[in-house]
């Protein structure tokens, strides 16, 4: 009993960090239509030894756990987006199946690429998108998705890249929808649900892929660290609706610029951590 008490005391600071991760991920996810993986993944990496991630499968378990929490980010903000009619169900119908399939491929490909190469590519991509959104924040087209073949390719790539990085793909799907004339708030609402679709697919694949891996103890369901997941999810669910509500207080122009600034700052930080 005494040993259990000491273990609980030792885990208390980590619990506080995990709850804070959930709050920040939910807030940013609800506000910008992203899953929150860009917040969850780097912080879990920094505290991986305290949470108990197995070094041999560190990146796989972090990505898998991040995707597991992202399922709940979209669910948390769903009611707000539906209430204010901020979801394009037509775009959902066309994009969701392809992103689901892409996430399956991405989870499989994760073991074939180094974490550094994936991070660098993702950071450069986000930096380019952020700069483009800052210089051209007003879409000039009506709401109309591109031709079928291009749409299929982009949606599948978003799914692949998201599962590779352990994110929900909002950093890609929001600018993509904006480029084809969707208002910022509808882009965010639609993207937040698409993030959950990607997360469900990716999480299931990571569970299956890690099911029989040696060294993963009872804290794991496949590659997913369910203990960390349970600590993060409550505050994700609590703060995702708050983020969605805050997004409604901003104009499309302000929201687009805030999102662009977020992309640039996040990409710069990722590149600095690698090369700085």
Image (spheres, rainbow, N blue to C red):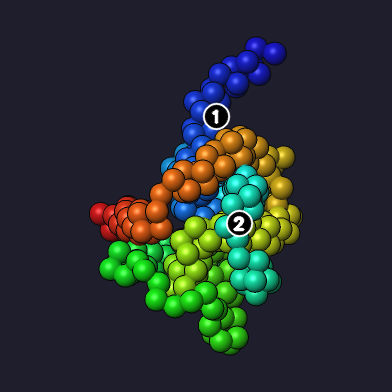
Sequence-earlier tag: 1 or 2: 1
Q: From the viewer's perspective, is the residue at label 1 or at label 2 nearer?
A: 2
Question: Where residue 33 appears, x then y in whole percent?
Answer: 51, 55
229 displayed left or right of 49: right
Looking at the image, the residue that sits furthest to the top is 2
Above or below: residue 68 compared with residue 176: above
Mark 1 residue element: helix
Whether residue 20 is visible: yes
Mark 2 residue element: loop
Position of the N terminus by quadrant = top right
Residue drawn at point x = 52 percent, y = 46 percent: 244
Above or below: residue 239 compared with residue 113: above
CA distance separating discs 1 and 2: 36 Å
Position of the C terminus by quadrant = bottom left
Question: Where residue 258 appears, x then y in whole percent?
Answer: 35, 53
Q: In this orientation, which residue lies closer to the viewer: 245 or 151?
A: 245
* Residue at which label 1 appears: 15
Whether residue 104 is visible: no
Question: Where residue 171 appears, x then y in whole percent?
Answer: 46, 61
Residue drawn at point x = 71 percent, y = 47 percent: 221
Q: In this orientation, which residue lies closer to the viewer: 269 or 173?
A: 173
* Residue at which label 2 appears: 85
Above or below: residue 82 compared with residue 52: below
Residue 169: numbered disc: none
């Amino acid at each position: 009993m005494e040993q259990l008490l000491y273990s609980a005391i030792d885990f208390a600071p980590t619990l506080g960090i995990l709850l804070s991760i959930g709050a920040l991920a939910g807030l940013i996810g609800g506000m910008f239509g992203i899953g929150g993986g860009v917040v969850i993944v780097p912080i879990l990496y920094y505290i991986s030894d305290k949470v108990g991630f197995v070094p041999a499968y560190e990146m796989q378990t972090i990505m898998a756990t991040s995707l597991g929490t992202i399922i709940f980010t979209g669910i948390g903000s769903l009611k707000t987006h539906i209430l204010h009619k901020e979801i394009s169900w037509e775009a959902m119908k066309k994009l969701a199946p392809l992103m689901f399939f892409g996430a399956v491929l991405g989870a499989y490909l994760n073991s074939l690429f180094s974490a550094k190469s994936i991070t660098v590519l993702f950071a450069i991509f986000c930096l380019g998108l952020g700069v483009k959104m800052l210089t051209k924040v007003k879409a000039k087209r009506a709401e109309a998705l591109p031709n079928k073949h291009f749409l299929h390719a982009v949606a599948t790539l978003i799914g692949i890249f998201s599962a590779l990085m352990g994110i929900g793909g909002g950093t890609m799907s929001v600018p993509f929808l904006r480029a084809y004339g969707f208002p910022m708030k509808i882009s965010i609402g639609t993207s937040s649900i698409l993030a959950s679709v990607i997360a469900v697919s990716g999480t299931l694949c990571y569970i299956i892929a890690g099911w029989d891996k040696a060294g993963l103890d009872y804290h794991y369901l496949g590659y997913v660290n369910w203990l960390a997941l349970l600590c993060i999810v409550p505050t994700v669910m609590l703060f995702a609706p708050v983020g969605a509500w805050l997004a409604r207080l901003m104009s499309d122009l302000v929201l687009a610029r805030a999102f662009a600034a977020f992309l640039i700052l996040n990409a710069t930080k990722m590149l600095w951590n690698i090369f700085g």
